Amino acid sequence: YTGSVDIHDIQFGHDNKLYAVNTLFSCIVRIDGEYNFTPVWKPPFIDKIAAEDRCHLNGMAMIDGKPKYVTAFNKGNEPKSWRENITKTGVVIDVDTNEIISEGLAMPHSPMIINGDLYLLLSADGELVKIDTETGEKETIVNLDGFVRGMSYYNDYLFIGLSKLRESSSTFGKLVQN
């Protein structure tokens, strides 16, 4: 039992431990039988682990069974600060170096390493993009004309979740409807 954590991404690591992005507490955690969760990393701009969804950390790409890149909606350190300008403040962070490798992204989500390259979704733009991890430049691979969240890669096929926006959402209702 984890209690309220708001997990957005979850994967097994090289050590057979379960890692997750704990969005509510703005950190990567390990899920085990000892505690509700064990924090293993937080962005350098987050000053404490608190149930405040400060930057909307939401996605994790693994390399060699360890968290390597994460996505967040902003670099905020205040509760729900990410809601202020969600289409222009998204970031990708290198977990090993704590460096922001790309920024100014429109709701980055679901990062994934495919054939050595970093791909992610820009939910607000409906795009699949490839991020150059050296320069931070993004290359649009395809625009899917909708709200994208969640990817899975299998046998050279990439499956992407696509949905309509909830018009009643106080945050996402402000986005342009495609």
Image: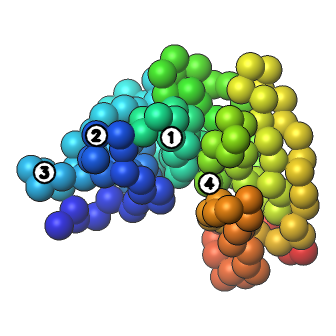
Q: Quadrant of the N terminus?
A: bottom left
Q: Which residue is mark 2?
A: 15
Disc 2 or disc 3, which is closer to the eye? 2
Residue at position x 64%, y 53% from top? Answer: 109
Residue 74 badge: none
- In the image, is 100 to the left or to the right of 98? right
Tell me the residue that label 3 is attached to: 35
Name the residue furthest front. 155
Looking at the rendered structure, the secondary structure element under dot 1 is strand
The one of 15 and 145 positioned closer to us in this rendering:
15
**How many numbered callouts?**
4
Residue beneath disc 4: 110
Callout 2: SS: loop
Q: Of the residues tagged 2 and 4, which is closer to the observer? A: 2
| Picture quadrant of residue 159 | bottom right
Q: Residues within 10 Å of mark 3 (few under 14, many from 20)?
A: few
Tell me the element at label 3: loop
| Pick the front one: 60 or 66 | 66
Contact, mark 2 vs mark 3 (Cβ under 8 Å) = no
State left or right for residue 178 relative to residue 57.
right
Residue 152 at x, y percent in the picture = 62, 63
Q: Residues within 10 Å of mark 4 (few under 14, many from 20)?
A: many
